[in-house]
Amino acid sequence: MLVKYKSLPKNECCIICNGHTYVFDFKGDCILTDAGLAPKYTTNCIDVSIMSFISLNGVTEVLVSEADKSASYIVTKDISEVILQIMSVGGFIRSLKQKTFIDDFAVTNYLFVFTLKHQNVQLILNNLNAKFKKEYF
């Protein structure tokens, strides 16, 4: 799954994924979930890798999207432990968050944006002792 990133004025940014544009404010909170594919969002974007984290019942699911493929992993740690480990490794461009619903439960999806094929993505998965779940093409 190809993911693109662009910095916007006022320290905002956008992520373009599967034809949808998500706009985030200066704090990293999602403020628009389908902003369209206007040139102000689509020009001068860079290809990036994304690590997405959602946690339910103390188990965190990780989705890694890099260039032409995505894979999901399971981490048997709470989301707060996972985020602390990511922050300690560093190397990400931006951290973002988006509220979403899973089976009528409101959850927060945490996103970390890395340069494409950044070596810290694999290092983070190793540090979290992530178990491979499924690959998507």
Image (cartoon, helix red, strand yellow):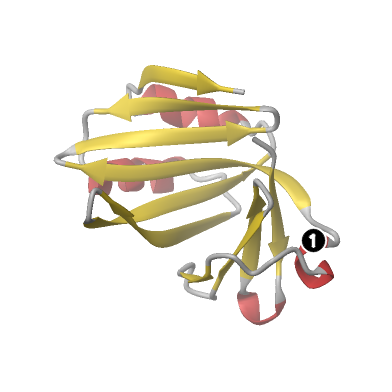
Q: Amino acid at mark 1?
A: Thr
Residue at 41%, 22% (x, y): give it: 126
SS of the residue under disc 1:
helix
Task: Tell which residue pokes out farthest to the front in this image.
Answer: 103
From the viewer's side, name the closer residue of 137 and 51.
137
Residue at 44%, 19% (x, y): give it: 134
* Quadrant including the N terminus: top right
Q: Is residue 62 left or right of residue 68?
A: left
Q: Is residue 65 left or right of residue 7?
A: left
Q: Residues within 10 Å of mark 1 (few under 14, many from 20)?
A: some
Task: Tell which residue pokes out farthest to the left in this image.
Answer: 57
Residue 32: image location, x then y, percent: 54, 71
- Quadrant for residue 12, please give it: bottom right
Determine which residue is flagged by label 1.
Answer: 42
Query: Up-down: is 10 above or below 12?
Result: below
Residue at 43%, 60% (x, y): give it: 97
Residue 136: image location, x then y, percent: 55, 24
Task: Tell which residue pokes out farthest to the bottom in this image.
Answer: 10
Residue 11: image location, x then y, percent: 63, 75
Residue at 31%, 26% (x, y): give it: 74
- Quadrant for residue 37, please give it: bottom right
From the viewer's side, name the closer residue of 20 and 11.
20
